[in-house]
Image (cartoon, rainbow, N blue to C red):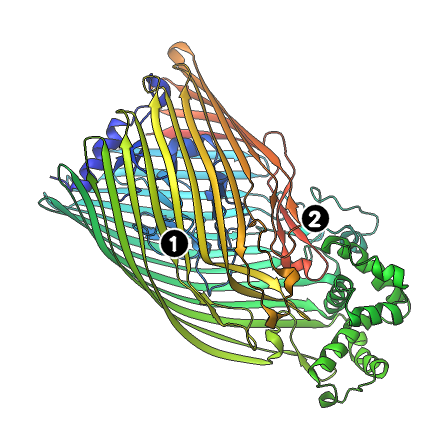
């Protein structure tokens, strides 16, 4: 016989394989969230599940598309190589390699260690499971916010195939081809080829259009029934990405219009970027899963290997204005190996799982920041105007910029964006006087004076004389368009060991008690090298990688972290169709290393992140199976939440710190088969979060004004609503016409740690899909539109450009239309 786990899963899926509109009850959805096949309605965890059929109906091509329709989840990832996944307000906003994500992404049981390797085409999948709340027991480390598990379709011992072609506006041309065939009575193979191609929807007047899609991939999986008790599944996948994607663009009118005379900035119109943003990735992954029956116990072994090389090029000022030129390059080379052994078994009253896991990740990363000398002048003006109450700024604005005290006082209430709007006009006055570079010269003189090093570089301690000495160097270099380039190299080796156990015991026929524990031990080593690569008036200087005044950094660090995570769950079935549960669960994410800033009294590493989550929930089927309704209420407390923030004076740097936070909320989800042909579904999430302890980093220049205690965490709206209406119209002997309308509304939300006043406006999105399903099901034709009403909203802002006075943003894709042609054989 086949192994117990596979046999149970195959039987469950077969029982649930009929379509929703062909029977008077809602279909059963099988998940493996607890490492065993179960009806999702019987699992005492808050889960959102997307089957292959649902993914098709949503016209979803990646996780970000699914995130828009998931309660309590945000995935606004216009950048495929640095995605951020937020569940219940929990995320890690660190895009460097010194830390780990807070939401774990798994592909067929193998952890995708870095976000750069997580965003891939959702093609030929069985389902996507989104588990909310800490999943520290069964999924382990880095699942403090939750876990996302992508499960592909396995090979089967039947001949089947599928070809899909998608065409649409913006030059969209996607293709999928899958074939499954048995090679013998004991071996079956499944092959998939997928291609995603679409032109950029951001028309760039100074370069190639941006935010395009261009990727190709192949996947093969082989199933070997190796005997009466053993089954082997081998999977291998290769993909390439090469696209002008993820472009950000300036939100500051004066920055755009200063470089494009006669044009007005329209943040939903044409952009003007002078550096080509690009995403390149080559990725290979393989896994070997073995299931072997040992009588009443099943042994599962999953061996995984993932490797990718990426290159991310970004225009960080989002403009073609030479006074703000700021670009970056971020190549990555990542290798990840994992091995898990798991034993599972079941008796009449007890179901249990126990296992051990090991992983090793090696990563090499290079960050290069490219500026012009003129960019330093814009940065200096931004710092002077934003800190107009400081003695240095007051002296400069009065003596050199010629402002009255009343005008200077009026600057103190301006937001960062308002400061960005006025920088060009203030700077133009100095250009007209032949003094372009005066702000950066004053900034450098003040900085060196505070350091007590002016005379070391032959500079006068007299403010006027010293300033003009520096201007004599800076001014000509600005006029000549001189470059300013900095880089930092980092590499790491991260190993993790874990043992775990989880069991569910039936106290009565209706009541179950589940308990689990996991011990995790992480051992990390991290190397970093950077140095000042530029000079001003003979003084070594760093802007992007200032490092608190340290001209050379060549460090090797290592540290270990360990923790015990667990869960305790009591569930009770009030009837055969309605259950309730109460749970307490904890999660753990190991500490890491600051990748972009070091200095006196600044910690080079930070503590592990821990969370405890309390939850009450119910899941039920009503009206003879025609209505399903799920609800969950939760409260969590975070200790040592890891947060990345651009901060500090006189030169801001990225620092990753620990903070404490809490959150609480409610999630509702329902599916209602109103008639045999009409289905209504929807979900709602309400979330409140706040920092309960936010220690300031005085060594980096923070003050009490930077304390965010009591402020909400960023990235997640307080309210989110999703609705879907699906109707199937019978066309007699010809077949059916299926119409589906999806709608989502997102409340406004705080988007930036650096500027809590910066908000994303509330917005709504709608998708429409019409599918012709002929009798026999051999082919399908669909016409669809995403963002049906062409909603325009900026969902993400960029802190890097904001530092020099050019706040940038990303917009959601505009309305798109297309057609799918699907053929089964």
At 32% from the left and 51% from the top, the residue drawn is: 139
Q: Position of residue 509 (x, y in %)?
A: 19, 31
Percent x, y of residue 393 = 79, 69
Is 352 located above or below residue 739 in the figure? below
The residue lying toward the viewer, choosing from 658 and 66, is 658
| For residue 436, side relative to residue 71 (left or right) | right
Distance CA(mark 1)–CA(mark 2): 34 Å
Image quadrant in which the C terminus is located: top left
Quarter placement of the N terminus: top left
Is 189 displayed left or right of 678 in the figure?
left
Q: Which mark is on residue 112? A: 1
Query: From this viewpoint, is residue 157 visible?
Result: no
Question: Does residue 372 appear left or right of residue 519 in this picture?
Answer: right
Tell which circle, 1 or 2, labels the residue nearer the N-terminal end: 1
Expressed as whole percent of the image width and height from the top left, the position of residue 690 reads 54, 49
Quadrant assignment, res 607:
bottom left
Residue at far top of view:
732
> In the depicted view, which residue is nearer to us: 359 or 657?
657
Identify the residue under disc 2.
271
Q: Looking at the image, how many numbered discs can be counted on the residues? A: 2
Location of residue 499 with respect to 547 vertically, above or below: above
| Mark 2 Cα-neighbour bin, 10 Å: few <14, some 14–19, many ≥20 | many
Q: What residue lies at 71% left-to-right and 42% top-to-bottom? A: 269
Name the quadrant containing residue 678. top left
Pointer 1 local density, CA inside 10 Å: few below 14, some 14–19, many at least 20:
many
């Amino acid at each position: 016989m086949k192994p117990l786990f596979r046999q149970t899963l195959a039987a469950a899926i077969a029982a649930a394989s009929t379509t929703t509109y062909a029977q008077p009850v809602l279909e059963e959805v099988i998940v493996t969230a607890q490492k065993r096949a179960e009806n999702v309605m019987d699992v005492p965890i808050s889960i959102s599940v997307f089957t292959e059929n649902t993914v098709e109906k949503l016209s979803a091509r990646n996780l970000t598309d699914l995130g828009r329709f998931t309660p309590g989840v945000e995935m606004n990832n216009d950048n495929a190589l640095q995605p951020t996944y937020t569940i219940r307000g929990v995320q890690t906003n660190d895009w460097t390699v010194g830390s780990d994500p807070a939401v774990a992404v798994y592909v067929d049981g193998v952890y995708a260690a870095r976000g750069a390797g997580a965003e891939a085409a959702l093609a030929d999948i069985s389902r996507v499971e989104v588990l909310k709340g800490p999943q520290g027991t069964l999924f382990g480390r880095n699942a403090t916010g939750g876990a996302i598990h992508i499960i592909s379709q396995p090979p089967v011992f039947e001949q089947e195939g599928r070809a899909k072609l998608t065409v649409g506006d913006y030059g969209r041309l996607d293709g999928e081809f899958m074939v499954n065939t048995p090679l013998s009575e004991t071996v079956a193979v499944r092959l998939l080829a997928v291609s995603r191609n679409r032109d950029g929807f951001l028309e760039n007047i100074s370069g190639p259009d941006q935010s395009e899609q261009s990727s190709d991939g192949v996947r093969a999986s082989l199933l070997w029934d190796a005997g009466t008790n053993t089954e082997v599944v081998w999977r291998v996948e290769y993909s390439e990405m090469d696209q002008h994607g993820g472009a950000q663009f300036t939100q500051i009118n004066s920055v755009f219009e200063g470089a494009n005379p006669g044009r007005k900035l329209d943040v939903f119109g044409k952009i003007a970027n002078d550096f080509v943003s690009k995403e390149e990735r080559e990725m290979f992954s393989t896994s070997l899963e073995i299931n072997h029956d040992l009588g009443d116990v099943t042994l599962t072994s999953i061996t995984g290997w993932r490797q990718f090389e990426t290159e991310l090029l970004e225009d960080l000022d989002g403009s073609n204005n030479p006074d703000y030129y700021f670009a970056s390059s971020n190549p990555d080379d990542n290798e990840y190996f994992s091995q898990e052994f798991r034993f599972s078994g079941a008796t009449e009253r007890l179901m249990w799982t126990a296992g051990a896991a090991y992983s090793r990740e090696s990563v090499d990363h290079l960050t290069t920041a490219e500026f012009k000398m003129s960019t330093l002048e814009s940065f200096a003006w931004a710092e002077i105007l934003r800190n107009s109450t400081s003695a240095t700024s007051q002296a400069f604005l009065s003596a050199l910029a010629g402002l009255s005290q009343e005008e200077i006082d009026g600057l103190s209430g301006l937001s960062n964006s308002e400061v960005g709007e006025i920088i060009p006009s203030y700077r133009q006055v100095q250009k007209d006087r032949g003094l372009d570079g005066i702000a950066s010269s004053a900034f450098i003189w003040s900085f060196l004076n505070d350091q007590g090093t002016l005379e070391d570089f032959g500079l006068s301690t007299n403010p006027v004389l010293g300033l003009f000495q520096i201007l004599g160097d800076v001014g000509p270099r600005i006029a000549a368009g001189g470059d300013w380039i900095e880089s930092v190299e980092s590499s790491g080796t991260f190993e993790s060991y874990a043992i775990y156990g989880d069991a569910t015991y039936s106290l009565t026929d209706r009541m179950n008690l589940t308990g689990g524990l996991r011990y995790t031990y992480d051992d990390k080593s991290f190397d970093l090298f950077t140095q000042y690569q530029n000079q001003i008036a003979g003084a070594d200087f760093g802007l992007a990688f200032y490092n608190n005044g340290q001209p050379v950094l060549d460090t090797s660090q290592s540290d270990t972290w360990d923790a015990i995570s667990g869960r305790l769950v009591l569930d009770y079935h009030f009837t055969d169709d309605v259950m309730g549960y109460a749970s307490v669960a904890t999660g753990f994410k190991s500490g890491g290393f600051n990748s972009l800033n070091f200095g006196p009294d600044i910690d080079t590493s930070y503590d592990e992140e821990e969370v405890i989550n309390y939850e009450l929930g119910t899941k039920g089927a009503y009206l003879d199976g025609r209505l399903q309704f799920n609800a969950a209420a939760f409260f969590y407390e975070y200790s040592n939440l890891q947060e990345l923030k651009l901060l500090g004076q006189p030169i801001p740097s990225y620092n990753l710190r620990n903070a404490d936070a809490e959150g609480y909320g409610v999630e509702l989800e329902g599916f209602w088969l109103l008639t045999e042909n009409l289905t209504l579904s929807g979900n709602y999430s309400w979330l409140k979060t706040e920092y309960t302890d936010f220690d300031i980093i005085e060594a980096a220049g923070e003050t009490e004004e930077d304390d965010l205690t009591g402020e909400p965490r960023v990235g997640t709206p307080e309210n989110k609503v999703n609705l879907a209406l699906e109707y199937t119209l019978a066309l007699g002997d010809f077949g059916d016409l299926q119409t589906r309308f999806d709608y989502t509304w997102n409340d406004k939300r705080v988007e930036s740690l650096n500027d809590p006043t910066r908000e994303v406006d509330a917005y709504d999105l709608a998708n429409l899909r019409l599918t012709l399903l002929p009798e026999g099901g051999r082919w399908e034709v669909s016409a669809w539109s995403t963002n049906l009403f062409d909603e325009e909203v900026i969902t993400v802002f960029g802190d890097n450009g904001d530092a020099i006075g050019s706040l940038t943003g990303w917009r959601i894709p505009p309305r798109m239309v297309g057609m799918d042609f699907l053929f089964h054989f």
